[in-house]
Amino acid sequence: YCEIFKNATHATAGIAPVSGIIPVPATKEGLVIIGDAAGMCNPVTGAGIYNAVYSAYIAAEKISLSIEKNDRSILSEIKDSYNDSFLKSIGRAVKKREYMLDNWQSSSVSFDEMIRKSWIAFRDYWK
């Protein structure tokens, strides 16, 4: 148990966390979360190596600036930086995963249509 987590309001878990970018990737106490733990996995494919490495780069830049200026509040900028870099792609994937799960066993949507709209190899995914 860690004091930093005593007021946790969000959890992400699973083989590949697929709920999107976590609401608070950095705390005022100085905890910074990157990669899979920060929700950087693509919720459809599970891919996330680049996102993990780049989120670490973003975090390192903000941590360095925070130390240099002796100001932990700079860490709160990590969320915006994550969103600037990843929200478009991860947000799309979250919606596509929700669509896929909602229609996986639906009789109103064909399997072919569902796959074409929810898998990255098809043009409809990008619409």
Image (cartoon, rainbow, N blue to C red):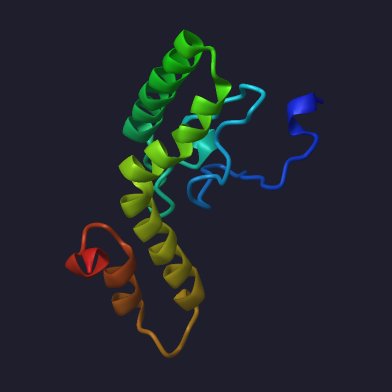
Q: In this figure, what is the number of numbered marks? A: 0
Where residue 97 sits: x, y (%)? 44, 63
Instruction: From this view, report whether residue 105 is shown above or below residue 10.
Output: below
Towards the viewer: 104 or 124: 124
> The N terminus lies in which quarter of the figure?
top right
Left or right of 116? Residue 18 is right
Instruction: From this view, report whether residue 40 is shown above or below residue 118.
Output: above
Towards the viewer: 106 or 35: 35
Left or right of 32? Residue 35 is left
> The C terminus lies in which quarter of the figure?
bottom left
Towards the viewer: 8 or 15: 8
**Measuring 20% from the left and 64% from the top, which residue is drawn there?**
122
Where residue 110 sits: x, y (%)? 35, 83
**Measuring 42% from the left and 90% from the top, which residue is drawn there?**
108
- Classify residue 11 by image quadrant: top right
Where residue 5 sits: x, y (%)? 75, 32
**Measuring 35% from the left and 60% from the top, which residue is drawn there?**
92
Of all residues shown, which one is farthest toward the bottom? 108
Instruction: From this view, report whether residue 3 is shown above or below residue 82.
Output: above
Of all residues shown, which one is farthest toward the left? 123
Left or right of 17? Residue 114 is left
Where residue 41 sits: x, y (%)? 43, 42
Of all residues shown, which one is farthest toward the top? 68
**Measuring 32% from the left and 53% from the top, which residue is drawn there?**
88
